[in-house]
Amino acid sequence: MVPRKKFLYLPEAVNDSFTIFPSDGPVSAPEPQDPTPPQPPEGPAGIYPCPCCGYLTFPVPKEEAIAYICPVCFWENDVFDPGEDDPSDENHGMTLRQGRENYRNWGAVREDLVGFARPPRPEEVP
């Protein structure tokens, strides 16, 4: 049996925070990072009104709130902004006018979502 030739080098190892080169000698571990994720600024959850219930639950203007669901009425924002009586694809064809009427009657845009909707907080009242 013929012995295999041994290679006297190590491959280069790359990590997000450092690169190991065998010729560089010993490599120390990277500095520990703070495991706490950044926290959102203090204050109300939203400063923009929901187009359906009117409470200040949207964190960004409705034109930028893609697929955002209002926690008060459960209206899913439609960034294409159909009119009052145009069906909203995000809300299974319901119009904004129907959603507002349903919210007044049940407390949510659909009767099956009433258990998930919550009352508005004092800071969300416009």
Image: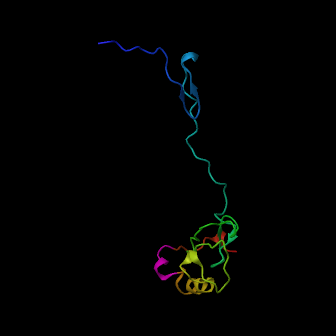
What colouring style does the render use? rainbow
Establish if 28 lies above or below 85.
above
Image x and y of residue 105, in percent: 54, 87
Q: How many numbered discs, if any?
A: 0
The C terminus lies in quadrant: bottom right
Establish if 1 lies above or below 65.
above
Image quadrant in which you'd find residue 32: top right
Q: Residue furthest left?
A: 1
Image x and y of residue 66, in percent: 63, 66
Q: Residue at x 49, y 20 (%)?
A: 10
Q: Residue at x 45, y 15 (%)?
A: 7
The N terminus lies in quadrant: top left
Q: Is residue 122 visible?
A: yes
Image x and y of residue 50, in percent: 65, 74
Q: Residue at x 64, y 87 (%)?
A: 85
Residue in the foreground of this view, choosing between 84 and 124: 84
Image quadrant in which you'd find residue 54: bottom right
Q: Is residue 73 visible?
A: no
Q: Is residue 114 magenta?
A: yes
Residue in the foreground of this view, choosing between 58 and 89: 89
Q: Residue furthest front?
A: 2
Establish if 42 lies above or below 75.
above
Image x and y of residue 86, in percent: 63, 84
Which residues, given as a range, are shown in magenta? Answer: 110-116
Image quadrant in which you'd find residue 22: top right
Q: Is residue 103 magenta?
A: no
Residue in the foreground of this view, choosing between 38 and 20: 20
